[in-house]
Amino acid sequence: MNQPHRPTLTQYLIEQRRRFPAASGDLNALILDVSIACKAIARQVAFGELRAPGAVAGGAINVQGEVQKHLDVASNELFLRQAEWSGHLAGMASEEMDEPYPIPVDYPRGKYLLVFDPLDGSSNLDVNVTVGSIFSILRAPEPVASGGRALAAEDFLQPGTEQVAAGYALYGPVTMFVLSVGNGVVGFTLDVNVGEFKLTHPDLRVPADAQEFAINSSNARFWEPPVKRYVDECLAGRTGPRGKDFNMRWIASMVAEAHRILMRGGVFLYPRDSKDPTKAGRLRLLYEANPIGFVMEQAGARASTGRQPVLAVQPTGLHQRIGLVFGSKHEVERIERYHAEGGSRELPNPLFVERSLFRD
Ligand code: AHG
Ligand code: MN
Ligand code: MN
């Protein structure tokens, strides 16, 4: 089968830069470094337990009380080593590091900050299910970029609307790189013959309507009423208030769920709940919710806390958690509406709804 000519990630970035004749090219170079780190992680992941005994199964407990797999740590190192030397960054922050990582003095500082989850869904590694890396690029405050003062955690506490670029890599049956530089969302597939990401999805758009939802329903007893109402209505199916049947998925790899939604629509919820009152949600704002939220909004979907757009949230901590709902616009808007209404209403009588002409 003849393969069509497909632009590489490098070519795509050069073409994007031509829209801004004054641009220095630093952002492009940084994104390419991130993509190289992701290619290296893809290879590590692909070797699985062959890499070293305990590579996918073993791990210690990290500062956040979660199991830190060897591959979590190795992936974090690959990001650091690939991105620290170039002079495009003033610092990095990651799920796997308690504190921000300043650029070593041997290297020049640059004007961007890189925030990442080096391996999302890593609890799926030992069962060989898709995982990925998530990244977000912010501007560094000027005094930090120019070396006038030291990097601080506060420099990263910028709302998601301030992201310059964001995306993720997916390590599944094929390796993909999905990116937004604020001009829509594009997807690349790793051509392993030449080791390059090739543009395979030039304009990713999420359908506004969907009949598929993703939520960890083992947490149902901790949900707030608006979430319970939404899920109950989905489960009620064709004879319920929604008047249609819904499908359900849960991969436990947020990045893989985001990718499915980007490909065919749907909604993902990891809402704030009462399971652990010390945590405002499961997912982390700066390196999970914000980059995925940016990609979703750029693809015409919506990302929300249930109460407000997630990209509008002013962060207060580097590893802050947040309730997150994203995906097909009309579904997310409905969930927001249920939150605004308080959401404690009873389900209407299905018989009545089935006969109603005014079902929405
Ligand atoms: P990470 O592997 O980076 O710690 O993130 C895992 C996250 C996310 O990817 C996924 O949606 C969620 O945790 C799974 O949570 P449950 O264990 O509650 O299913
Ligand atoms: Mn994660
Ligand atoms: Mn992770």
Image (spheres, grey):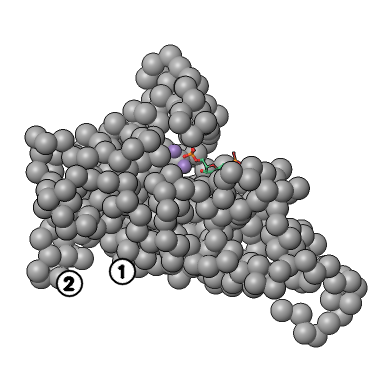
> x%, y% of residue 220?
73, 49
- Give the residue drawn at x 70%, y 63%: 226
- The residue nearer to you, when weighing 275 against 67, is 275
- Give the residue drawn at x 32%, y 63%: 162
Q: Amino acid at mark 1?
A: Asn
Q: Farthest residue to the top: give it.
A: 53
Labels 1 & 2 near each other (Cβ < 8 A): yes
- Ligand 2 near label 2 (Cβ, under 8 Å)? no
**Label 2, residues with CA under 10 Å away: few <14, some 14-19, many ≥20:** few
Determine the quadrant in which ligand 1 lies: top right
- The residue nearer to you, when weighing 108 against 299, is 108
> x%, y% of residue 355?
87, 80
**Label 1, residues with CA under 10 Å away: few <14, some 14-19, many ≥20:** few
Q: Is residue 251 left or right of residue 18?
A: right
Provide the residue designation for mark 2.
19
Q: In the rendered view, would you say 187 is above or below 255?
A: below
- Give the residue drawn at x 76%, y 80%: 359
Residue 227 figure quarter = bottom right
- Give the residue drawn at x 16%, y 35%: 104
> x%, y% of residue 248?
67, 53
Q: Secondary structure at mark 2?
A: loop
- Ligand 2 near label 1 (Cβ, under 8 Å)? no
Q: In the rendered view, would you say 144 is above or below 360?
A: above
Q: What's the mark number on residue 195?
A: none
Q: Secondary structure at mark 1?
A: loop
Q: Amino acid at mark 2?
A: Arg
Provide the residue designation for mark 1.
183
Query: Upstream in the sequence, badge 1 or badge 2?
Result: 2
Which of the image's four quarters has the C terminus? bottom right
